[in-house]
Amino acid sequence: MATMADVARHAGVSVATVSHVLNETRPVLPHTRQAVLDAMEELGYTPNTLARSLVTSRTRSIGLAVSAISNPYFTEILQGVEAAALEHGYSLLIADPHDDPGHERKVVQLLHERRVDGMIVAPSADPRELLAYLGRHKMPAVLLDRVVDAPADGSTGLDQVCADSAEPTARLVTHLAELGHRRIGLVAGLPGLSTTTERLAGYRDGLAAAGLAHDEGLVVHGNSESPGAEQATTALLSLPSPPTALVTANNAMTMGALRSLRDHGLSVPDDIALCCFDDFAWADLFSPRLTVIAQPSRDIGAQAVSVLLDRLAGPDRPARTVRLPCTFVHRTSCGCPEQSLTSVKGTAS
């Protein structure tokens, strides 16, 4: 196995120069740096990550804590995080907090104990313990997908990366209203999540823009999961005057809603129109094809890495929240005939 001394001899430089190239502890002339990198490649030299971390106090690793990793939305975010981390020479440690506040804090502590340089976390509905831990240990972190207010103790807020939620949801509602629907139901997510709050606000905004009254009886919570959405949709269908159109607030709940509609013998869109927040690979394969709001999942993941690396490079820079635009994907589950779809996609941001 090649050593650092072997690399130095092959490149015609000192061992110290090789160390500076590896650990970025001192500027090295570009042609010298390239000679060292070429020597490493030719000799098959593998850096000792543990030794490097002792020199630089960095492990070149990022902790990622997201719940429901099996959810296609978070899977695509993970792919974006992983690709961006690898591009910048970082490895990834992944944990699932299961949307449980107590477990969330334990997961973050375990990642911290493994000396990750920073973390990307999708916070639970009650992130108080998480925020207290991150603040107490001054851990560089980026909150993902779900935003939170600045900590109550007045300390500096955290960087956050998410998609727009309110306006795109309003667009789904106004589109259904334009098609003549007056009773539009919403299967909302887990209470306490910012995405749930924002999509509820967008739903109300859409109703107001269409001149429709807000009926609390048409809003049910599927708790961001398929089984909960199935039960919630069944509750809506049991109303004396059920909705004629439905908006589901994430992809998992879309599956639950479709299951309930099937069990009730209802056809989409003939019996009830359906619009969904979140696109997924097989949404275009359903019959009818699902009209959705598509989030830029991989871009969200990549942007979270970029923001975290900026934080590591400038610990004292002001915290920022980055919101990425969504896309309205117009298909046929809303009730529009195939031939009327003049444009498949339109920006919703």
Image: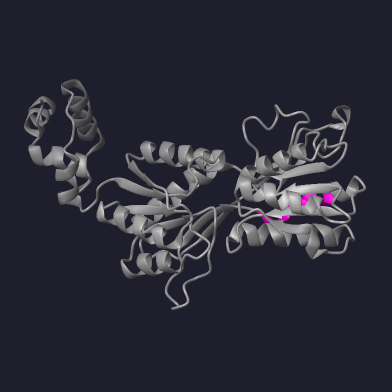
User: In the rendering, at what x and y percent does residue 328 appear?
Assistant: 73, 42
Q: Is residue 328 visible?
A: no
Q: Residue at x 54, y 57 (%)?
A: 146
Q: Is residue 172 magenta?
A: yes
Q: Position of residue 117 (x, y in %)?
A: 30, 52
Q: Is residue 156 above or below residue 218?
A: below
Q: Nearer the viewer, residue 15 or 95?
A: 95
Left or right relative to 325: residue 243: right
Q: Which residue extends farthest bottom?
A: 153
Image quarter in which the N terminus is found = top left
Q: Position of residue 118 (x, y in %)?
A: 34, 54
Q: Based on the displayed image, in which of its 4 quarters is residue 338 positioned?
A: top right
As drawn, which residue projects farthest toward the top? 42
Protein image colouring: one colour
* Magenta-colored stretch includes residue 143: no
**Closer to the camera, 22 or 278?**
278
Residue at (45% x, 63% y) in the render: 158
On the image, the x and y values in percent for residue 136 come to 33, 70
When asked about the image quadrant of residue 193, the answer is bottom right
The part of the image, by quadrant, that contains residue 264 is top right
**Start and end of the magenta stretch?**
165-174
Q: Nearer the viewer, residue 14 or 202?
A: 202
Task: Name the residue nearer the viewer: 110 or 257.
Answer: 257
Q: Residue at x 70, y 29 (%)?
A: 284
Residue 124 appears in view: yes
Is 89 positioned to the left or the right of 174 in the image?
Answer: left
Q: How many numbered marks does the figure carry?
A: 0
* x 48%, y 39%: residue: 80
Q: Main secondary structure of the magenta part?
A: helix
